[in-house]
Each structure stands twice: as C-alpha cells, then as structure tokens.
Amino acid sequence: MSTSAINTVTTMSISNVPAETSVPSATADTAAAASADRRKRNRLLTNPWFVGGLSVALVIVAACLAAPLLTRYAPNDIDLNSLEAAPSSAHLLGTDALGRDIFSRLLYGGRMSILVGVAAVAIQVVIGVVLGTVSGYFRGAADAVIMRIAEIFQCFPFYPLAITIAAVFGANVWNVVLIIGLLQWPGLARLVRGEVLSIRENAFIDYSRAIGVPTYRILWDGLIRNCVPVIVVNATLAVTTAILSEAALSFLGLGVSQPDPSWGNMLSSAQSFRVLSYEPWMWIPPGVAIALLVLSINAIGESLQEYLRPRFGYIADILPSRAAKRTTR
C-alpha cells in the first residue's frame, strides 16, 4: 500500500472516531498500563534476589566511597613494625609484606575496581548500542560492514589481545578502561541488532514512517528504548566481566599498577605459595569482595530483566499528535 493510501486511511479512521469514545478508551488503556507497572514494581521490590543483591552491592559501594571515614590508615601507609601481621585490633584484616593495612587497601582498591568496571561498560554500551541499532535498522551495507568489524574483534581471544595491548601501551587504570571497553562491545552490538531486527517488523514502526515521524525519533523512541531490557541486563553482566577482567590483568601486573590498590593487584600476593598457604588474610578479603559484588550485580540484572520487559509503547505517545496534524492539512 502506498504512503498516500495509508495517509488517507489514517485520516478517515481518525475522523470517524468520536472524541467522546476515544478519550475514555485512551484513559482506560493508560490506567491499565499504570496498574500493570505497579504490579511489576511490587513484584520486583519483593523479589528476594533483587533486594538481597541490591543490598549487598549498596553496602560494598558505600563502604568503598566512605573509605576515609572507615579506616585509620591511608592505603599506602607503611608500618615497618607490622610486616605481614595477622588481623588484630590495630589492623582489622592484617597487613601485607610492606606493612600496609589490608582493610584500608581493600576499600580504596574497591573504588578503583568499581571505577574501571563502570567506565569500561559505559564505553562498551555507547559503542554497542549505537552500532547495533544502526546495523539492525538500516541493514544492507551498513549492517554488513558493522558485523564484519564485530567479527574481526571477536576472532581474537580477549585476554591474549588485552595482555598484548597492555604490554605495549603500559599498565595504568585508563589503559585498562579503554582496553576492556573497546574490545568487548561486539557482544552487546549483536544483541541490540537482533532486538532491533525483531522490533522493526512491528506495525507501529511502519505506521511511524508513514505519518512522517523523523528517523531519529524512530531510532530512539521506537527501537533503543524498547531494547532497554537487553541493554540493562547485558550492562550489569558486563560490569561484572569488566571487574573480573581488571582483576585478571592486575593480577598479572598489566592492570592497575602498584602502589595504587585494586582488588586484582591485591590478589597478586597469592602468587607466593607461602602467602597462599600461611597468610590467607592477604588474598581472601579481595577475593571475597570480588565474589560478593559480582554475584550481587548479577542478581540485580536478572531481576530487572522481567521488570524492564519491552512494551513497544514508547513511540505511541508521538503518533496521535502526528496523525492529528495530518488531518488538519
């Protein structure tokens, strides 16, 4: 059906609907949607996995942010009288081989690990969402080029490539952020592309084009906002992956470099058999912190997946006004 025919049908349909019946119908639909949202929100807030995961994550993040208030030592303060000391009232989690307080380094190191995870995922989400949306909506040559680039990135194993890049450009926090963010976007781009390919076949996308909705509004309101569940769940999982990647690179001496603490380079002390066997206070705290934060973020992401299920309704808000304008011409 041609665009002019669709416009004619749209005009006739709108003009034949009495105002007094269309308004109550729209009001009823809005009320039903609001009621459904409230029920989903209540289920989310009573979900033990979501509540537990959110509580643990908030406690860890809050403790790391409040590190100056919770610790008596700076992370790099050296106590030569307490080298490799076991936990005590003076040092709650003991000290490392240089006499630095483990508890202080744990909290300040958490700041660094969380910063790396969030910043790397922000880069990954921006690149993945933009390229995935463009690829899925426009298809054709754009789709082919973007997917071939994604395949090239995915051909190389992440850790060997990341280790090589870190060794060439040096070990520091921002290099780690860029390495993780720029190497791990293809997975999200493919997921977003798949969602966009599915959503673009819905009638409301064709209707939006027919009545002249700008392409950027279709991309944002019709596609990206309806991909939010996939983006949110993938981003939460990506944060945990980024934290683990930073820990692995720092463990190998290619991530956050000493003396700055991170959970990864704190774990590097476990490379010594003596520390691993007889001084567990050096490596158990950062290991437990990583495990708790990763599990809690995963629980949050899985719980949000059901709550953020797409409704294909965001773009509907701009359709009535657009159609009404056409009827007045």
Image: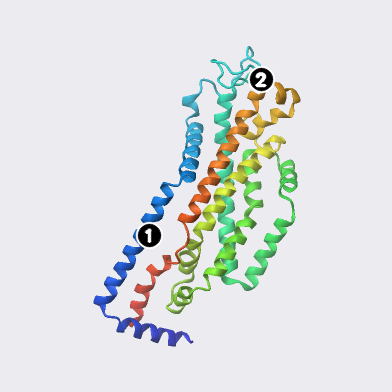
Expressed as whole percent of the image width and height from the top left, the position of residue 215 reads: 49, 71
Q: Report the colour scheme.
A: rainbow
Horizontal side of residue 220 vs 170, given as left or right:
left
Q: Residue at x 63, y 11 (%)?
A: 81
CB of mark 2 within 8 Å of CB of mark 1? Answer: no
Q: Residue at x 48, y 87 (%)?
A: 2
Q: CA distance from mark 2 to mark 1?
A: 58 Å
User: Quadrant of the rendered structure where residue 34 is?
Assistant: bottom left
Kindly identify which residue carries mark 1. Answer: 36
Expressed as whole percent of the image width and height from the top left, the position of residue 163 reads: 73, 43
Kindly identify which residue carries mark 2. Answer: 98
Expressed as whole percent of the image width and height from the top left, the position of residue 260 reads: 62, 30
Q: Secondary structure at mark 2?
A: loop
How many marks do you count on the picture? 2
User: Quadrant of the rendered structure where residue 30 is?
Assistant: bottom left
Q: Is residue 200 visible?
A: yes
Picture quarter with the C terminus: bottom left
Q: Residues within 10 Å of mark 1 (few under 14, many from 20)?
A: few
The type of residue carrying mark 2 is Leu
Q: Residues within 10 Å of mark 2 (few under 14, many from 20)?
A: some
Expressed as whole percent of the image width and height from the top left, the position of residue 4 reads: 44, 87
Compared with 23, 105 (above or below) is above
Compared with 33, 171 (above or below) is above
Compared with 178, 62 (above or below) is above
Q: Check the image and name the residue furthest to the top.
A: 81
Select label 2 or label 1 by which is in front: 1
Horizontal side of residue 41 vs 99, given as left or right:
left
User: Quadrant of the rendered structure where residue 314 is?
Assistant: bottom left
